[in-house]
Amino acid sequence: MAWAVLLVAPLLFGAQANADTDTLKIGVLATLEGAFEPLGRDALRGYEIAVQEHEEGDGERPIETLTETTDGTPDSVVAKARLLIDRGASIVIGPLAGIEGIAIRDFAKSVPEVTFINGASAAQDATLRAPAENFFRFNPDSMQWIAGLGHFAYDEKDIRTIVTVGEDYSLPYTQLMGFMLDYCAAGGRVLGNHWVSPGASDTAGLAERIARTETDALLLALDPRTAKSFLEAYGKAGGQAAIVASSTTLSGSLLRSGDAIRPLLEGAISALPVSESDDNDGWEAFTERYRARFPDAGPAPSLFALSYYVNAKALFLALEETDGELGDGHESLREALAELEFDTPFGGPVALDENRQAVTTNFIVEVAEAEEDFLALRTVEEVEEVSQTLGLPYDAFLALGPPGRRNTRCPETTLAEAEPAAPETETDDDAPAEEPPPEPEEDEATVETPADALRDQLVEMLQKDAAMPERGPSIVPCLSYRDAPAAIAWLKEAFGFTETMVVPGPDDTIAHAQLAFDGGMVMVGSIRDDELQMRTPCDLGGVTQSIYIVVEDADAHYERAVEAGAEIVRELEDTPYGSRDYSARDPEGHLWNFGTYRPAIGE
């Protein structure tokens, strides 16, 4: 017990001392390591602008900012949050990335004496499921960004039927689920869902097949480069359906990508959490202050600077309400935060729901011709008071389950009324994910607008963040090959794996590689003379183990493997236990099994 008191005392002492002194210590979590470093640096700029405004307003209480840097992973952000508290912070602002947000939500429950305010994390579950009573978020989550687009597509664009094409990971699931709740409630029908591997560059076959489908529109939840490749093939095949896009698809580079896809993009619609209107005075004022304080930072703040600013601004407004006092157990501060409502540079007011999550305005945008003969987005409708459950009662929304492949079709419960909907047809297509094409060349005559920069930053971060699993697989098979580079290329082409890491070795060998497939992974390397004594089946004259991979569409996967020249050991068949599967060998003899049977842990 004595040791327990000694371990807990620094946390309690730091928070209590902070509450009773004139200087308020605020901890800030900034992702300044790894892939998110540029975004984390800009997020700090947004926080600093909020501090500057607080100091200019003669805030009731002086503050001291304590900063800790994270690398964008759950373990890192929790360790740094703990360190901030050890240093005396009683309020923590952050984090930036989605998976960090969920980790901080869980950590917040273990330190109820500390108040946490989000930075820029847009992960839905940071506040929706099992929320922490001491975690507040004043920016919308990634499903709120799509709110209203479904009704607009149906009511204003007369889109009665739609086919979806999405990348096969969490962010597109979330956006498509939010769209369907809205679109299906209006009366729209989904003719089919198609999936491609994240970052896929070869979508021509899929585009040609979809071009033969009679539908009013396509809903694209794709990386801008993948969308460009798909639309070029779709247009060449004669496709003419209207385009509806997710919040991260219509980047500035895509809108300036040339005449080949321009006819398809003109009139396309999407939704964004930030207003594109010229009369967004809050955004203009924030941008001017940003440029004045950080003249070398770029033409406009990013979404992450804006989100950190809004969340920090909320804290300082709440402190004004309490005359700088936190109250016993932060009761006064938390009550002020919960009741706060103010206008933001996002383009509308923000308030919190019972889970301390932002209720705010969303913006429907349309592609139109702008000055200098290039395409841009213009706001065509505002969707006010968008809640995290998109208008559904909380329990009814949770009953739908979390975003996933199966939640991208018309649900049984819609926003209009809880009536069963007709089942929809789903077609799963896994397109090969090869090396991404080079970045499109920019037209030197065009100038990127602040809105373009904001969208491109949004795309960059979300693709990195949403593609990162909260937790990797617990069991990972490891395979050795005589010619590992050739094996990796073949596994990508024949079986649809994607590279997540490749570490070259000497003499054209592979020291270590990680290949992903639908949330799973295998590790691959070149055979070498070491204590592990790894060999290939060709060396041994047989196999001692094989790998089973779950696929949604065994027929499509089988056709892909056959086309790539895989040796089929067991033909595609329906099994007595309800699966449809087949077995194949790779060029060096490793045995692979693919099927629709998905075992459940614990059953």
Image (tube, grey):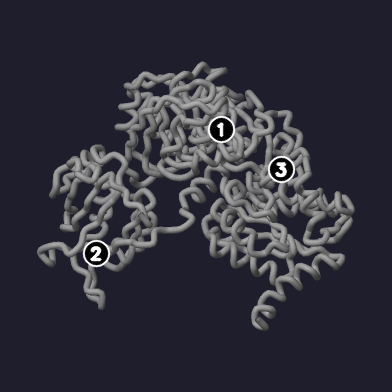
Task: Give the x, y percent position of residue 557.
Answer: 25, 41
Residue at x-position 33% and y-position 61%: 476
The relative height of residue 509 versus residue 254 in the rendered view (above or below) is below
Q: Is residue 97 visible?
A: yes
Picture quadrant of residue 534: bottom left
Q: Alpha-carbon distance for marks 1 and 3?
A: 44 Å
Residue highlighted by disc 2: 480
Residue highlighted by disc 1: 445
Task: Give the x, y percent position of residue 281.
Answer: 76, 34
Residue highlighted by disc 3: 352
Q: Alpha-carbon distance for marks 2 and 1?
A: 51 Å
Q: Depth-wise, is mark 2 or mark 3 nearer the camera?
A: 3
Relative placement, left or right, of 271 versus 216 is right
Residue at x-position 43% and y-position 34%: 227
Mark 2 or mark 1, earlier in chain: 1
Secondary structure beneath dot 3 equals strand
Pointers 2 and 1 in contact (C-beta within 8 Å): no
Pointers 1 and 3 in contact (C-beta within 8 Å): no
Task: Give the x, y percent position of residue 166.
Answer: 42, 36
User: Callout 1: 10 Å neighbours few (<14), some, many (20+)?
Assistant: few
Q: Quadrant of the C terminus?
A: bottom left
Amino acid of disc 1 = Ala
Amino acid of disc 3 = Leu
Secondary structure beneath dot 2 equals strand
Residue at x-position 54% and y-position 22%: 186
Mark 1 or mark 3, earlier in chain: 3
Q: Depth-wise, is mark 2 or mark 1 nearer the camera?
A: 2
